[in-house]
Structure formats: structure tokens, C-alpha cells
Image: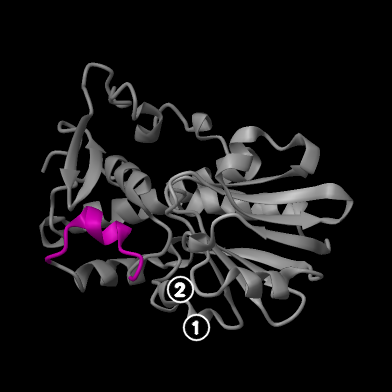
Amino acid sequence: MPELPQVKGFVTYFKSTCLHKKIDTTYCEDEDFIENTSCSYLQHVLNGRQFIDVYRRGKYLIAELDDNHVFVLHFGMTGNLSYGLKKNVSDDDKQYAKVILEFEKDYQLLLINVRKLGKLYLTTSLENIKPLKNMGPEPLKLEETNFITLLENHPNKNIKSFLMDQSLIAGIGNELSNELLFQAEIDPHLKIKNINDKKRKKLYAAMQDILKKAVNIFTKNKDSSQYPKSWLLAHQEDLVCPKNKKHDLKKETIAGRSAIYCPLHQSN
């Protein structure tokens, strides 16, 4: 699932391709993709309009139109954006496009979602979008003292579950939580109350460092193959511990999600 860095990359892509261009036609290929309105109303609002700004909140892309409407996109597990000339659209992109925005001069933006878990919202107020209304703070804007307080307020919560809880911290999902815990050398099985102060501060430092570097990767090329070899994320397939090639990473379900960790470096 696209997490904070990937969505930031989508924001950069959207900004460079779709702002200040008139939308001629809106095509709805899958009405179930549209969460809180109808295809006909989406077309009514978008056609003839322009996007004037775009930004990210958590795992959501938010694009403002030149009236009072806001276009909100959640990418689900496999969401993507593809912009280009209509004649150059690939068959795969065409097959999995849920909504297509056609701009002037035959350019199109395709909202692609293979596994049908993404959602598109249209609203005049972000307060109307429940996941956004209930969302926690942005991790890169979170001071260390506030992060430590958040941890202290949830002593019985599993640490991996804590990191992925969007009502507590926005934008971190399964893969990033694995990475942050690996870098902080914290066992993902632990409840927060069993993590010492030194490790809590180390987790905060890892969160700031990893997120900034991942954002830089995805705003440049949207390519996860560019992860540093010192990251766990670069070894999700070979399961070789980046801290010691003699150690194997382990896959396991923790807190209801698939976790990858090093049993040696992340021991209690």
C-alpha cells in the first residue's frame, strides 16, 4: 500500500502534470471507486474546472479545484497515477483505470487501481471525510516530546500496531513500520510499556531519518528499487539481514499484519 513517501511522490507527479489545466471530460470506469458521490455529480463538478493546488495528508492525496471543491484520493494497496497523451496509454493502464480525467490537447490522467481497494472522494470540506477528520499528526511535524507522550499514553498497545494506527500517527503503514522498528532495533512483538526510554528515542530518530530519505527517493523517481541496501525494505525478497548477511530476516504475522524483522538484532 502506498504510504507517506509514495503518496508524497504522487503529489509531486500530480503537481508537475495536472495543475492549471482545464478538465474537458471525466470518465468513470468503476462507480464503486467513488466513495461519497455519484459519477454524474463527479462529472458535473470536474468538467470545465482546473486543479489549483495539491498536497498530502497521511496516505491521502488532496487536490483543490478552482471552485470550493476538493478531490481526495486514497490509493489502496496498488493505486497509481499515469499522465500522458491518450494515444500512448498502455492496455494495462486502460484496463485498471477507475477514473480518467481528460484534459485539453488529448492529455489524460488515469487513476489506476488493480485490487479495487482505493477510493476517490469529492467534498467541499475535509471535515466531511471521516478518515481525515480522525487522523493523527504528521510524523515529520511531530516533536520528540510529543511522540514520547503518545507512546506513554498507550502502554498496552503493540508497538507495530501503534505505528500503523492512523488516528495516532498519519502515513505510516506496514512496510515503514517494519523499517522503523528494524532501524531502532525494537522487537515488533513488544507492547509499548516494555520498550525502554533509550529505544523510544531511537525509534523517533529513525522515524525522522527514514521518512525524510524515503520521501526524497519517491519525489525523484517513485522507484522503490532505490532503497539503500542498509534498509530492511531492500531485502523483503531475499530476507537477508542488511546488518549481517549471515542472519536471515523472518516473516511473521504480528498485530494482524505481515511483519519482517531480524530475530537477532531486534531481540528484547
Count of number-bearing discs: 2
Label 2 close to label 1 by CB (< 8 Å): yes
Q: Quadrant of the C terminus?
A: top left
- What's the amino acid at mark 1? Glu
Labelled disc at residue 127? 1
At label 1, counting other C-alpha atoms closer than 10 Å, the crowd grade (few under 14, some 14-19, many 20 or more) is few
Residue 265 as seen in the image, left or right of residue 17: left
Tell whether position 110 is magenta: no
Q: Nearer the viewer, residue 71 or 92?
A: 92
Residue 266 as seen in the image, left or right of residue 202: left
Which residue does the image show at 24% across and 41% down from the upper left?
A: 259
Which residue does the image show at 13% across and 52% down from the upper left?
A: 190
Q: Nearer the viewer, residue 148 or 26?
A: 26
Tell whether position 161 is magenta: yes
Instruction: Give the residues in magenta.
Output: 156-167
SS state under label 1: helix
Task: Give the residue number, with chain letter if any, for mark 2.
Answer: 132
Q: Quadrant of residue 94?
A: top right
Which residue does the image show at 61% across and 82% down from the upper left?
A: 124
Residue 62 as seen in the image, left or right of residue 168: right
- What's the amino acid at mark 2? Leu
Q: Is residue 128 above or below residue 187?
A: below
Res 187 visible: no
